[in-house]
């Protein structure tokens, strides 16, 4: 039993593993375009990077296919992150995103660990 627990811990993906570009941006600072992307462009947002910038997670091209090719939870995470970015703007969005990013990473490791 311990072997399975150790195995799952060794394969646990961090935010940097899942979204290296956005992790780097959040460590430094977000510019105006980054915030605009979080608010308006689900294909290139944080969750979009995790999905390989395909837009699949949001049904970018054909919304009815989300249950088949995407993930409703990821859609909700992306929307929540966009709302935070819209509300707080460039100055304080990075700190405000941390709790939802932690929840997203936990979800990713439970539901999509083999996508990366």
Image (cartoon, rainbow, N blue to C red):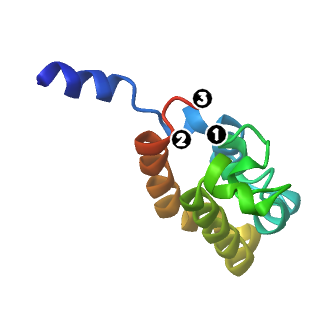
Instruction: State yes or no: discs 1 and 3 in contact (Cβ < 8 Å).
Output: no
25 or 99: nearer the eye? 99
Residue 98 percent coordinates (x, y): 51, 59
Q: Can you identify the residue that label 1 sits on?
A: 19
Residue 100 percent coordinates (x, y): 51, 62
14 or 76: nearer the eye? 76
Alpha carbon distance from label 2 to label 3: 11 Å
Q: Residue at x 68, y 41 (%)?
A: 51
Q: Is residue 3 left or right of residue 26?
A: left
- Quarter where residue 86 is shown: bottom right
Q: Is residue 53 left or right of residue 46?
A: right
Residue 113 percent coordinates (x, y): 48, 34
Q: Residue at x 77, y 62 (%)?
A: 63
For marks 2 and 3, the one nearer the N-term is: 2
62 or 6: nearer the eye? 62
- Mark 3 Cα-neighbour bin, 10 Å: few <14, some 14–19, many ≥20: few
Quarter of the rendering occupied by the N terminus:
top left
Q: Can you identify the residue that label 3 sits on?
A: 116
- Mark 2 Cα-neighbour bin, 10 Å: few <14, some 14–19, many ≥20: some
Quick one: SS at disc 3? loop
Q: Residue at x 42, y 48 (%)?
A: 106
- 93 over 7 or under it: above or below: below
Q: Which mark is residue 15?
A: 2
């Amino acid at each position: 039993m311990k072997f399975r627990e150790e195995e799952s811990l060794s394969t646990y993906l961090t935010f940097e593993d899942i979204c290296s570009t956005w992790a780097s941006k959040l460590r430094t600072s977000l510019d105006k375009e980054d915030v605009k992307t979080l608010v308006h462009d689900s294909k290139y947002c944080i969750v979009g990077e995790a999905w390989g910038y395909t837009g699949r997670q949001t049904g970018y091209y054909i919304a009815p296919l989300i249950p088949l090719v995407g993930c409703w939870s990821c859609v909700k995470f992306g929307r929540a992150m966009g709302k935070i970015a819209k509300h707080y703007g460039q100055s304080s969005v990075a700190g405000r995103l941390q709790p939802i990013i932690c929840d997203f990473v936990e979800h990713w490791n439970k539901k999509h660990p083999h996508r990366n």
